[in-house]
Image: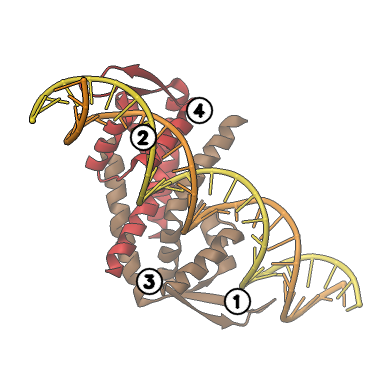
Chain colours: A brown, B red, C yellow, D orange
Amino acid sequence: MEKNVNTENVRAQMRKGVLEYCILLLLAKEDAYASSIITRLKEANMIVVEGTLYPLLIRQKNQGLLQYRWEESPQGPPRKYYAITDKGRAQLEEMNNAWNEITTTIDNLK
Amino acid sequence: MEKNVNTENVRAQMRKGVLEYCILLLLAKEDAYASSIITRLKEANMIVVEGTLYPLLIRQKNQGLLQYRWEESPQGPPRKYYAITDKGRAQLEEMNNAWNEITTTIDNLK
DNA sequence: TTTGGTACTTTGTCTTGCAAGGTATTGAAC
DNA sequence: GTTCAATACCTTGCAAGACAAAGTACCAAA
């Protein structure tokens, strides 16, 4: 069905714009490792796949917004737990502002 | 200033996700030509440049969401007025739904 | 020692935003 | 009648990033 494809594209494009924002929102609440982030964003209707998330986390870490530590897993290989840094919290502030502006803009255009 | 650059990046990224949505919102209200769309989005704090908008309008037209007609200008070259089609309005519906879902998701993550 | 589950990483492709440069039309100034 | 400024539209080349797919590695249980 063409319609479904289109619908998914629409959602996908909008998601992209706020993905980094969502990651920081999530990590501002508590530390997490990549696989758990994917699960939790999926629960929140924000589909992400590994090939997207891993490079994104590395980018954010390289920008100093995140840091990580290794932790043993009860089962399977060790997990890379990411935590938000002070710089990351500052960036999150900016993103909150940006998000508020965007929503205001859209409301005005409606 | 590193901070300003970052801030602009944050806003730019979020804007991208909703640009097509904004165009359809705008054209749903009244027909417009590219230059006027740029001006009006700028007024609404949604920066767009020609190199972004022209290809985007062509894409949306090729998808059947828009159509255009030429109109004489009181001054300068003729203008290409874009109008939203029925298919475009259907897409706009989808986008409204998608937007509502995204905002709900973000609220839940906050 | 093989199998299945968990986790992290990389590669290649495709889309898309944008800076920069280009073309065309019109009217007014010189 | 030619230059200039304003208005419009369009294209090219680069860079960033999302994602599918494939790869590597660890662990425990059968």
Q: Look at mark 2 in the image and give the residue it sits on.
A: B23
Q: CA distance from mark 4 to mark 2?
A: 15 Å
Cα–Cα gap, marks 4 and 1: 46 Å
**Label 2 amino acid?**
Ile
Query: Viewer-nearest of labels 2 and 1?
Result: 2
Task: Name the front one of labels 3 and 2.
Answer: 2
Disc 2: host chain: B
Residue B11, quarter of picture:
bottom left
Label 1, label 3: how many angstroms apart (C-alpha)?
21 Å
Viewer-nearest residue: B40 or A92? B40
Query: Mark 3 highlights which residue?
Result: A88
Position of A98 compared to D18: left or right?
A: left
Residue beneath label 4, please?
Answer: B62
Q: Are marks 1 and 3 on the same chain?
A: yes
User: Residue visible at 36% across and 53% down?
Assistant: B12
Using a 10 Å C-alpha cutoff, classify the residue at mark 2 as few (fewer than 14 neighbours), some (14 to 19) or many (20 or more). many
Give the residue at mark 1: A79
Q: Chain of mark 3?
A: A
